[in-house]
């Protein structure tokens, strides 16, 4: 069945509107943190993989860092392991870490790179088994609470990532770090994505989330904020839980030379493409 004239006009209009953005971001590195609902819903998953393949095919250089919260939670429940969160970080004991390595390090990492490859852009998963990209140390949070095997990024070894980019391969990075004692640490994926974007001097950092973006006290979406305003929001406790590491990662990336950071609603189909190729976008821009 053919498409209607109206549908054809819509497609042409979208492609035409996207052209200046394709030109602007041609050859530029764009780091995308993939997580939340976009990872759990089958059609959103396929849509995300196609978006990344399209970015690659029009000359952009996407680099993916992924989370895996819902998948880890399911596996922990099956194993009867109880796990809590503190300021957006999962408290991680040895039993939890074993599940994190299996799910986040292998299963999810392989699935994402395979989906992107099937969509037409060659992709490779970089995880704790085959690379040592994320060098880390144990994270002790502000209140002095020991979170167990939870890490913070000390350094990103970019050589492997840059090699894949040069070979036209999309790197898919799992957020598990290695400390000086060769101990594996579970790291918040937003923090890893921010540090990867900084280390690669990326043009953009895009963080997918399960809300419409950063909102003010009244719940109104803030479509664009400065780093100073973002710091004020953090200080006043307007954002909570998992949004805290997201906003910190975005602010630090913007401060460290990443041209713009975006916190976007991953529940919107083709959210990444809409954020890159349209004027309005689908979330909050931090610059």
Image: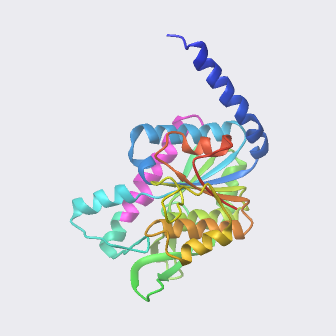
Q: Eyeballing the image, is 218 above or below 146?
A: above
Q: Is residue 111 left or right of residue 7?
A: left
Does the rendering let one see residue 83? Answer: yes
Q: Eyeballing the image, is 51 above or below 9?
A: below
> In the depicted view, which residue is nearer to us: 79 or 252?
252
Q: How far across and down, in percent of the image, does residue 91 sit?
A: 37, 75
Which residues, given as a range, are shown in magenta? 100-121
Residue 76 placement: quadrant: bottom left
Q: Quadrant of the C terminus?
A: bottom right
Residue at x 32%, y 72% (from the top left corner): 84
Q: How far across and down, in percent of the image, does residue 80 sit?
A: 21, 65
Which residue is most to the front?
Answer: 218
Main secondary structure along the magenta-highlighted residues: helix
Examine the structure image and report whether residue 120 is included in the region drawn in magenta.
yes
> In the depicted view, which residue is nearer to us: 256 or 167?
256
Q: How far across and down, in percent of the image, does residue 225 sit?
A: 65, 62
Residue at x 55%, y 68% (from the top left corner): 191
């Amino acid at each position: 069945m053919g498409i209607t004239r109206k549908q054809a006009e819509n497609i042409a209009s979208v492609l035409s509107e996207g052209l200046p953005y394709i030109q602007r971001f041609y050859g530029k590195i764009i780091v995308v943190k993939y997580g939340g609902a976009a990872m759990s819903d089958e059609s959103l998953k396929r849509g995300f993989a196609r978006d990344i393949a399209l970015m690659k095919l029009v000359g952009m250089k996407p680099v993916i860092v992924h989370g895996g919260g819902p998948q880890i939670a399911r596996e922990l429940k099956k194993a009867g392991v109880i796990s809590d969160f503190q300021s957006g970080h999962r408290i991680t004991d040895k039993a939890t870490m074993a599940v994190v390595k299996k799910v986040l390090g292998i299963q999810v990492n392989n699935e994402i790179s395979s989906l992107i490859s099937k969509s037409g852009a060659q992709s490779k998963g970089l995880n704790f088994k085959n690379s040592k990209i994320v060098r880390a140390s144990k994270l002790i949070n502000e209140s002095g609470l020991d979170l167990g095997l939870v890490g913070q990024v000390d350094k990103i070894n970019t050589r492997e990532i840059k090699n894949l980019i040069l070979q036209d391969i999309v790197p898919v990075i799992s957020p598990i770090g290695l400390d000086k004692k060769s101990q594996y640490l579970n790291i918040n994926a937003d923090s890893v994505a921010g540090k990867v974007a900084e280390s690669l001097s990326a043009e953009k950092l895009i963080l997918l989330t399960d809300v419409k973006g950063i909102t003010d006290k009244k719940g109104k979406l803030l479509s664009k904020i400065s780093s100073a305003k973002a710091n004020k929001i953090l200080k006043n406790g307007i954002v909570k839980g998992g949004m805290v590491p997201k906003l910190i990662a975005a602010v630090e990336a913007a401060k460290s030379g990443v041209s713009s950071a975006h916190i976007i609603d991953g529940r919107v189909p083709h959210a990444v493409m809409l954020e890159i190729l349209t004027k309005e976008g689908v979330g909050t821009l931090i610059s």
